[in-house]
């Protein structure tokens, strides 16, 4: 997932050119079948309790670059748009059916980046094979995904905030100590494209040769 710049206002610190910073996140949901003990406000038809979340891969604090997360639930839920403006960025509810949840990640003000919007399919039920078809109350279902938020050319203030915590920095140029960089990546892509061009040329040459032989 790539963050996009907002319109830069006067006085905003300038961007760090030709550099990208990535921050890993995990998102998704866990769910359990409701047992005899039910939340007091859970409707009678609800069968599961579930939690939707955006977290660091090891549950580390990500509020230094994420300001808030907005979860848009199914319209049948009261106050279907829920905002979580402090860690942990998660929301727990009950329900009976699966549906798409819109997740919007808003970054801290210093980032001057547009929010990220994507969808997660709420999973409540296990996808068992034929050997196990029944879900017990204590069986936890999980649908969790890993991704990386990419900040292309972050502004200087936000760059310093990002660098204050461990993370993944992809340099723009290769150095002796650099194992991987955007430049090395582009060089590899260029080599692949050149190879494809050569193969395509050889195919066309072979087609022309075969066509000529058939005519003769």
Image (cartoon, rainbow, N blue to C red):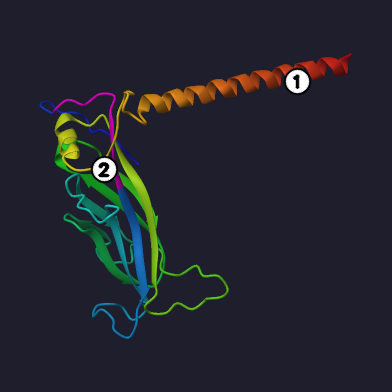
Which quadrant is the N terminus positioned in? top left
| Residue at x 85%, y 16% (from the top left corner) | 213
Q: Is residue 132 above or below residue 115?
A: below
Reading the image, the residue beneath label 2 is 115
Label 1 SS: helix
In the displayed structure image, the side of residue 208 where residue 72 appears, left or right:
left
Viewer-side label of 2, 1? 1
Return the x and y of residue 215 as percentages of the image width and height.
87, 15
Q: Residue 158 appears at what percent x and percent y?
A: 17, 35
Residue at 29% across, 24% down: 18
Which image quadrant is residue 115 in? top left
Region in magenta: 13-24
Label 1 sits on residue: 207
Left or right side of 154 for 29: right
Q: Quadrant of the C terminus?
A: top right
Q: Is residue 179 magenta?
A: no
Q: Residue furthest bottom?
A: 36
- Pick whichever, 198 or 78, lies toward us: 198
Alpha carbon separation for disc pair 2 and 1: 51 Å
Give yes or no for contact between labels 2 and 1 (Cβ–Cβ under 8 Å).
no
Whether the magenta-drawn stretch holds residue 15 is answered as yes
User: Does 192 sit above or below residue 91?
Assistant: above
Could you tell which of marks 2 and 1 lies nearer the N-terminus? 2
Q: Crowding near pointer 2: few (<14 within 10 Å), some, many (20+)?
A: many
> Which residue sits at x=22%, y=43%?
166
Please identify the quarter of the rendering in which residue 38 is found: bottom left
């Amino acid at each position: 997932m790539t963050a996009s710049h907002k319109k830069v206002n006067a006085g905003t610190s300038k961007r760090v050119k030709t550099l990208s910073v990535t921050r890993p996140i995990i998102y998704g949901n866990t769910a359990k079948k409701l047992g005899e003990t039910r939340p007091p406000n859970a409707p009678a038809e609800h069968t599961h309790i579930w939690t939707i979340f955006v977290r660091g891969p090891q549950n580390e604090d990500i509020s230094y670059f994420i300001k808030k997360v907005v979860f848009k639930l199914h319209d049948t839920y009261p106050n279907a748009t829920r905002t979580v403006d402090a860690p942990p960025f998660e929301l727990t509810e009950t329900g009976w059916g699966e549906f798409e949840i819109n997740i919007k990640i808003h970054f801290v003000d210093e980032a001057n980046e547009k929010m990220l919007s994507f969808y997660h399919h709420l999973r409540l039920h296990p996808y068992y094979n034929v050997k196990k078809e029944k879900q017990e109350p204590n069986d936890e279902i999980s649908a969790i995904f890993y991704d990386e938020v990419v900040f292309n050319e972050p502004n200087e203030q936000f760059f310093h905030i990002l660098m204050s915590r461990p993370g993944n920095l992809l340099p723009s140029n290769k150095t002796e100590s650099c194992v991987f960089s955007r430049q090395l990546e582009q060089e590899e892509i260029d080599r692949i494209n050149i190879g494809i061009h050569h193969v395509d040329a050889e195919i066309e040459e072979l087609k022309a040769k075969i066509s000529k032989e058939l005519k003769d």
